[in-house]
Amino acid sequence: MKKLFSLILVLMGMTMAFAQNSVTLTFECQNTDGSYLQPDSITIENITRNWQETIYYPDTTFTLMVGTGIQNHLSENSLQVMPNPFNGTAKVNIQSMESETVEIKITDMGGRVFAEYNGLLQEGGNIFTISLTTPQMFLLSVKTSSGVRSLKIENTGRSGANRISYNGVAGENTADIRLKSTSSHPYELGDEMRYRGFSSSRISAEIRKNQYEDELITLVLYEVGSPCPETPTVTDIEGNIYNTVQIGGQCWMKENLRTTKFPDGTDIPLSSGTYTIEYNNPCYSDLPIVSDIPLIERGYLYNWVAANMACPTGWHLPTDEEWNTMEATQTTMDVAIVGDRGDHAGRLAGGSSWVSSSEVNAPGNMEYVDRNASGFFAIPAGAYEVLYNQYFYECAAFWTSTEVSAGNAWERTLLSYSAFVFRSYGGDEYPNKGLRMSVRCLRD
């Protein structure tokens, strides 16, 4: 009997999962202090099925149709109440795929009718205003030729009357609020999704998750290029003070590391600056050729071993994935591919030391309006690579902590003449861990 009961529960769960033919996402945006923030737009990305859509305010909800998209569900109406719970009045959006009659009722849980409406739905989003005088739980029912859909609603306030008023089709009146967008892209329960919010000069950290059910998703938006709210500066073991910058949900150093000591106070060995295949011993380089770029901007160059050990306590050398996360706040292009990718190098670059370039979005293009829009302030401190060049003034190269092999690790490179940010690692003949590059630390 116990096994039979377990089987019944499993079958019930499977039935409920298969019965769900849509998932509705409701988005809200907040400032870092928890106060409400009106978004400009929200991007919804299905990583599993490789598509992305953007909704624009006043849209605040997004419906994912399970299966191959909305084409499979043209006969169904979408029903949404915003907000819910509500204080006396709320907006209702009924999505109809064709012109048809509708009967709307608001009843208490015992079936007593408080308000009703009979009329015609137009094709598209039909906006209604509901008003209720009694704070309690109600049932909103919508009956059309396609069937009946019901939704529990909660009133917490008192309006002047119990009524349902038709406002028209969304978009016909600029005062109307479009509450729902419905995706025509394919979606299945459990797909990996990614969400980001944007508002003026603010951007949210991404929320990435497997989406199984209806959900209220809260996006916290940060001022682009502003200091980290709780850590505007950080001090290393030598007393060097670094400004910070909040990029999405991450707190970065806004300046290159320039310490000559590890956090425990021991010295980092100073190298001559020459490339060596011996990459297992930590070292840093101070190359006087760039003396006209102040040390406070250029920092020192470290090999990979030292870079992994040198960040102040509470901070660390970012991983390859953490770099991807930061870069994804600056471009809609795929940042996970290898080599030249993105169009955001200029958004990461600051200062006036870059070799001049007319290339759009490039670090050396001083006329680019979004130059250093991220606040990252990358400086062309170069990278010591004796077989080719030192690239001072035309290159900024940064370590990640992610290894590829015993002698190689992922790195990021910005060039003065390119909008791309180069994601790469060394090779078997010249493993890159022995190179000297800049270090930016990320808060734990």
Image (tube, rainbow, N blue to C red):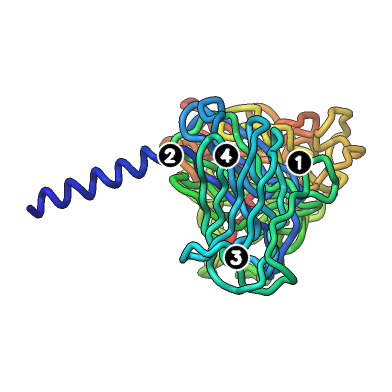
Q: Which residue is mark 4?
A: 144
The C terminus - image quarter: bottom right
Type of amino acid under label 1: Val
3D distance between C-alphas at marks 2 and 4: 27 Å
Q: Which tag, 2 or 4, sits closer to the chain's start?
A: 4
Q: Which tag, 3 or 2, sits closer to the chain's start?
A: 3
Q: Point out the frontmost of discs 1 and 4.
A: 4
At which x and y percent is residue 104? 61, 50
At which x and y percent is residue 403? 46, 41
Q: Label for residue 169?
A: 1
3D distance between C-alphas at marks 1 and 4: 17 Å
- Choose between 257 and 284: the one closer to the eye: 257
Q: Point out the frontmost of discs 2 and 1.
A: 1
Tell me, yes or no, if residue 67 can be seen here. yes
In the image: residue 145, left or right of residue 420 = left
Q: Which tag, 1 or 4, sits closer to the chain's start?
A: 4
Q: Label for residue 85?
A: 3
The residue positioned 74% from the left and 61% from the top of the image is 37
- Which quadrant of the view contains residue 382? top right
Q: Is 191 located above or below residue 105 in the figure?
A: above
At which x and y percent is residue 147? 50, 39
Are circles 3 and 2 on residues that touch, CB within 8 Å? no
Q: Which residue is mark 2?
A: 189
3D distance between C-alphas at marks 3 and 4: 25 Å
